Amino acid sequence: MIHKSPKVYKYMKIKFLITSLLAFILIKVNAQEALNVMPYPQKVEMIEGELMLNKLTTIKYEGAQSAMVSGAIVRFMTKYKNASLRPIQIVGSNEHSDITIQLNSLPHLGIPNLEAYQIQIDSTIQIQAASEIGILYALETLNQLMVSNNEGVHFKKLTIQDWPTYAWRGMMVDLARHFIPMEMMKRNVDAMAAVKLNTLHIHISDDEGFRIESKKYPKLQEQGSNGKYYTQNEMINFVKYCKERGIEVYAEFDLPGHSQSWFAGYPELAAEKKIYTPGPRFKIDGDKPVNLTSLMQMMNTTSTPSLDVSAEATYTFLDNLTKEMKPIFSKAYMHMGLDENNGVAWLKNPKIVSFMQTKGIKTPHELQNYFSEKFSKIIEKNGLTPIAWEEAFHNGLNKNILVQVWKPGFMGPTMSIDTIAANGNSSIISRGFYLDVFMPAYYHFLNADFIKEKSDNKLLGGEAAIWSELVDESNFESRVWPRAAVIAERFWSSNKLLDVDNMYERLNIINHKLSWDGLQQISSVEKHVDQFTNSQLNEGGKELLSLITPIKGYKKIMGLMTKPTAIQPSSFRQLSDIIPIDAAGKWVFRKQVKQYLQNPNQENRTKIEQSLGTWKQLSVSVAKSGCLSSIQIHADNLTSISSQILTYMSTKDEILKSNIIKQISIARTPVNETELAILDELDALVSGKLKDLDMSLSVF
């Protein structure tokens, strides 16, 4: 704990406000000199020139001995050597060094935030922070600033002062529906640390699986996991691994619904007494998909696995389990879930109905409120803070429950942070940060629901979320990264940072740096594309794949949910499961189109004509290899549209223009759950106006 007098603190706050104002100014002034860093620092002051290190690089730490800092320095040195192929070594505190790291007091640093840091690069590199975690963040930024070539290792000369906008910067990973191996989770944590995320929320139980060993109740994992779970020792070591990287971990046991895996071993806990096995809540019989109306009716009327919340034995069980799980995780929170429970199983149980009548409980929602109060008090009694999804919120909710907001607007009125705060509850936001709805990075970057909020005691921050109905170990990394880096920036950086083009330029570089440092989000895509195409992919095929994406929004998950259970996929190896969510070629072409519309000179026109000329040949090229026959229609459409636009650019024929617009409309139809990503840009070449980026979240 660092103590400071009111006078010193007042001075620091004034200085900090001035620094914040300068940061907003510098974001605009230095846009043309933007650093390839993510999250982008709050304040950057560029100095002319660069520092080049081309011999033995030395690094030293001036501060109390610390396993966390020592580990961070070793990791930085490893990345430095791997990227530059040049030596780096630690020297003593009295020796000259190229990189000096100092742990200073908070008043000395001048930023009233224990996660803050400062980097000064001139003739040497000076790092200052007021905490160990600040040093970790500074080293991650320094790693991103590094540019290596044959001459040496280069750093732009600058001064950075940086601090987070929000304290809670998290990621929720659903390990229950599809189990993710520990080594992959560690790579994910390394990437989280690189972009300064500090909280890992593990959704560790659901209908499909209970993924953590319980010694008190061993049948939870023995019969509820299909053999795929973490032992307590594995999780303890993993949590330690996370903590060394500045990341705290907490677990979610999603109740009172989402609990089928619990009942496989302990059916007495269930509201409906029967035999249970881990698996999806909803089962569709037959061999044909159901329609949307039937699906909605099934979700609302089917008796789904639910805890018997009327039985005191249920709460004894939860108390014992909470006691057992608390020491395993490092963040003093436990998530209760409290979402998506229709209450039908309760209303079909006479004992529970009688209990409701005795207690004056009129509806399943009120019964869930009863459970929420009881379970949250158990969690608090065990020294933890309870968390719940927004469905749990109601006036009178236990004020100590942290509310996690997630529902998008199409699901009805959205939950207001102010409404939650008026009841005395704090909140975190995941709305607009769901990675599993396959929205491009810009959707998360421009998340208006989050940008409009202010960091204060009401809103602690947010969490990216990756639900795993459509994710397993084969595509986990490419479904999370690199888009999670953009969400991390939204949590850390100024809400004035809104330049999408610059974001994508930086994201492309950070994506590769994450790959260099061990993440497999790029190599896994390459591997699975190679397998899908039987190594027959030609240049035309590569070009087409750079221009398509999976279908966006909830379309893919709704497609899965309407399929009969017997034919639902057991793995995710189709093209729509493999290709990146952001089409790299789109952003190159979009930039070309913007430049052409702003200034249709010969240089800009030539770039457009070259792109269209390449795509004019795609139909023949893709058909020649035959390995992308499932999306050949995309190549055919793109060839036809490109050819016609080339003609239109010369003739300006209105009939041709009308035909092109019609064909673009037809080409918007998805093909095997993929879609062309550049149709708005092609439309702009004939309409003369580039549409705004689509922020709508499609459902069907």
Image: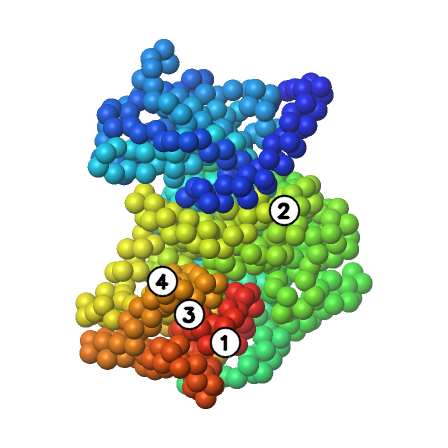
Q: Are marks 4 and 3 in contact (CB under 8 Å)?
A: no
The residue that appears at 28% across and 55% down in the rendered structure is 523
Q: Where is residue 513 in the image (x, y as percent from the top left)?
A: 34, 45
On the picture, is 308 further left or further right than 201? right
Q: Mark 3 points at which residue?
A: 677
Residue type, mark 1 in image: Ser
- Disc 2 and disc 4: Cα gap in Å? 60 Å
Note whether 81 is above or below 447 in the view shown.
above
**Helix, strand, or loop for circle 1?**
helix
**Helix, strand, or loop for circle 3?**
loop
**Helix, strand, or loop for circle 2?**
strand
Residue type, mark 4 in image: Glu
Identify the residue at the far bottom of this view.
Answer: 655
In the image, which is nearer the foreground, mark 4 or mark 3? 4
Q: Do the residues labelled 4 and 1 touch (CB within 8 Å)?
A: no
- Disc 2 and disc 3: Cα gap in Å? 42 Å
On the picture, is 489 further left or further right than 421? left
Q: Mark 2 points at which residue?
A: 386
| Crowd around label 1: few <14 · some 14–19 · many ≥20 (10 Å) | some
Q: Name the residue under label 1.
A: 687
Q: Do the residues labelled 2 and 4 touch (CB within 8 Å)?
A: no
Q: Earlier in the sequence, mark 2 or mark 4?
A: 2
**Helix, strand, or loop for circle 4?**
helix
In the image, which is nearer the foreground, mark 1 or mark 2? 1
Residue type, mark 3 in image: Ala
- Disc 3 and disc 1: Cα gap in Å? 17 Å
Note whether 688 is above or below 496 in the view shown.
below
Q: Mark 4 points at which residue?
A: 603
In the image, which is nearer the foreground, mark 2 or mark 4? 4
Q: Earlier in the sequence, mark 4 or mark 3?
A: 4
Note whether 651 is above or below 265 in the view shown.
below
| Crowd around label 3: few <14 · some 14–19 · many ≥20 (10 Å) | many
